[in-house]
Image (cartoon, rainbow, N blue to C red):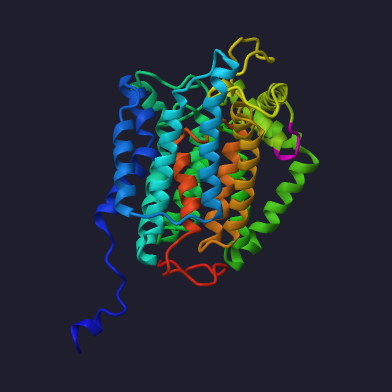
Amino acid sequence: MPKESQNVNQPPAPDRVRSWLAKALIVIALLNLNGLFYMLIDVSQLFSLPLLIFSIALLLRCGRLRVDLQMALFLIFLGAYLAFGLLFIPIYSDSRADPLLAIDVMGTFLLTLALAAHIQQSRSPEELFDFLRFVRNVAVLSALATLASPLLYQIYANAPPSEDYRNAGIFLNPNETGLMCMLAYIMTTVVPFGKRPIQYLIAGLILVSAVVTFSRSAILAILVMLLVSIFQASRWIRLVMIPSVGALIVVILTNPMSLVDLIRHQGIINLGEQQIDRLTTTVLAATGQIDSRTSNSRTDMVQISFEKAMEIFPFGKGLNTFHHISGGIMGADDWLGSHNLYLMAWGESGFLVFAILVAFTIVMFARGLRSIAPWVSLYLVLLFLTSALTSHDTLSARFMNVVIALILGLTTVPEWGVDQRREPIALPA
């Protein structure tokens, strides 16, 4: 048989340069190398230049970018946020405005588009799977580093401010660590390890890593994904787990204080008062009690941010102004910020930018349902929303740029995908 005939069904060889550039960006972003080396040796932004160079190189290597409605809305949102945010700085002359934030936004633009373009340029399901598996492995390593926090805190030059009662691993903010645990759990669920015992062990360690961050939003979001995973599991697992989980949910909803008392009086793990309070408020939040206490004052931040945004409706006060909110219940002149991406975009760049971001979110969810890997996309959208509704750093956190790139890329894969986008591709095991 001619040699050409033997190779007809073989997938095209992957572009190794493009692959290594993308993997280098994943390592820098998911291992939080900028933040890690700041904590280790007190040097900031050490990897910002390599991140910029690799992003530009990857974009040039890919050569093109497929733009659908979702991608277009994201690009319009970033451009409008940047343009109006800069425009309003000289108009309102707010002392907290900072045009240098534009550099950070440009970094978000380059990194997100470079990784999305890389996913689009995948030449076969095997190449895409190899990339997703690499993302999974790095995300798992980043999440499990949380369990080494006590050791890491001894060698850090700049330990996280909450080191006494929360574990943040290789991140400065334990809430970001919780989000990274979410990403690790998502990737482990949708790109499982080959051996089931290893899969269960890794998933269990990720759950423990999320709990020891004491991040309420991350714990609750991972529990939601865990429930979905149980319903998707094999029949015998559902028969065993669903009644038990159902009974536990009924107990929590009808008598949450019983679980609160169990947490407070258990003698297995020595918990501090702040740790007990965080776990207690997590249980109460799970029952639907969302207030100042269970949200750690985030509801107050949202209210004050909304009021300040309405004062200048429909305009904004300029870049960085809603990263720092003056006043509030904290008793400080320079408060903690909006802790909400949507209100941050509104307050800094105006209502139109807020509306574009809402439209992007709606389209992102709808497109996720039609992705070649629907559960991957929908889990990632849940992660995006968890970050966007509880933090104003979704755009600046580089690991969240990876999340957005995955969402954008998986809905615009190349022609080797399935013509009917509602049918998922069977990735190789």
Q: Is residue 102 magenta?
A: no
Q: Is residue 393 visible?
A: no
Front one among 356 and 18: 356
Q: Position of residue 416 (x, y in %)?
A: 41, 70
Q: Is residue 125 above or below residue 30?
A: below
Q: Quadrant of residue 392?
A: top right
Question: From the image, which quarter does the C terminus lie in?
Answer: bottom left
Q: Is residue 176 above or below residue 334?
A: below
Residue plotted at (60% across, 17% down): 92
Front one among 192 and 118: 118
Q: Position of residue 301 (x, y in %)?
A: 67, 24
Q: Position of residue 16 (x, y in %)?
A: 25, 56
Question: From the image, which quarter does the N terminus lie in?
Answer: bottom left
Residue bounds of the magenta highlight: 286-290
Residue plotted at (50% across, 35% down): 395
Q: Is residue 36 visible?
A: yes
